[in-house]
Image (tube, rainbow, N blue to C red):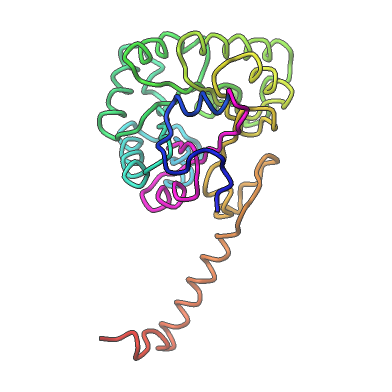
Amino acid sequence: MSTNTVDNKKKVTTATLAAMKARGEKIAMITAYDYTMATLVDRGGIDMILVGDSAANVMAGYKTTLPITLDQMIYHASCVVRGVQRAFVVCDMPFGSYQGNPDHALASAVRILKESGAEAVKLEGGKEVLASVEAIVRAGIPVMGHLGLTPQSINQFGTYGVRAKEEAEAEKLISDALMLEKAGCFSLVLEKIPADLARRVTEAVKIPVIGIGAGPGTDGQVLVLQDMLGMNDGFAPKFLRRYASLGTAISDAIGAYVSDVRTSAFPSASECY
């Protein structure tokens, strides 16, 4: 049962999230990619659902987030939106849908909102994508920024290691965060950066900051649903806390079903018409 002190029936909006930061109330965010899981997550009292481009990994089996397309993200987001009553739904803009130029970025963001029903978009990067952020915000579309480890840049980074450990990169990250806030971002994700730096950024900006692998000093946290439910045994970064072991439970349930089918224990007389 949810322990949130916010109204678990009233629809979450950007104003709700801003008020939560102002009150010092932590924001809970999780990923989801389909109707069934979105329904369960929403029922659990989550504040924000991110339809992440991590769908490329956990739903499609790709090694990186790069292959997923705009059409596929819209499909996943539309499935999630149909399962949600309360949570605020944010959809990732996939690689190649916003980096080229502001007009292309705006067209991509408009498609996401019109075709999926998501309430905001998220994109990676700071100064490099500032013009795209400004164009989307001017159109009245809420934008969530994303700094630190930006998985769409994996081929540039060459590693999924902690970012901004050196002072120069840390200072650029703070500058980018302030820049994104000024450009109109309603929120910001910080991924896999030192906890002290994440706290400094959170204190420096007025918008809600959501962390993943960024320590407890942010305004909220986000995890990938399948990871925190223990459905992905091969992924175990330091920041991940598993709240269930559903991978084992599901495999055991399937094994029991297979056994019952093969021994004719299923269906029983009471399960026949």
On screen, residue 171 versus residue 257, left or right, reads right
- Residue beneath the point at 74% across and 16% down: 166
Query: Looking at the picture, does residue 182 appear above or below residue 35?
Result: above
Image quadrant for the N terminus?
A: bottom right
Marks counted in the figure total 0
The question of residue 24 being in magenta is answered with yes
11 lies above or below 233: above
Residue at 42% over, 32% down: 90
Quadrant holding the C terminus: bottom left
Q: Which residue does the image show at 48% across and 40% down from the upper left?
A: 7
Which residue is nearer to you in this view: 60 or 272? 272
Q: Position of residue 36 (x, y in %)?
A: 38, 53
Quarter holding residue 10 = top left
Magenta span: 22-51
Q: Is residue 20 magenta?
A: no
Name the one closer to the observer, 120 or 43: 43
Residue 164 falls in image quadrant = top right
Q: Nearer the viewer, residue 31 or 128?
A: 31
Residue 180 rendering spot, x and y as whole percentages: 51, 13
Q: x, y (%) of residue 13?
A: 42, 29
Left or right relative to 46: residue 239: right
Can you say whether 255 is above or below 5 in the image?
Answer: below
Q: Residue furthest bottom?
A: 269
Residue 21: percent from the left, percent from the top? 57, 25
Between residue 164 and residue 29, name the one nearer to us: 29
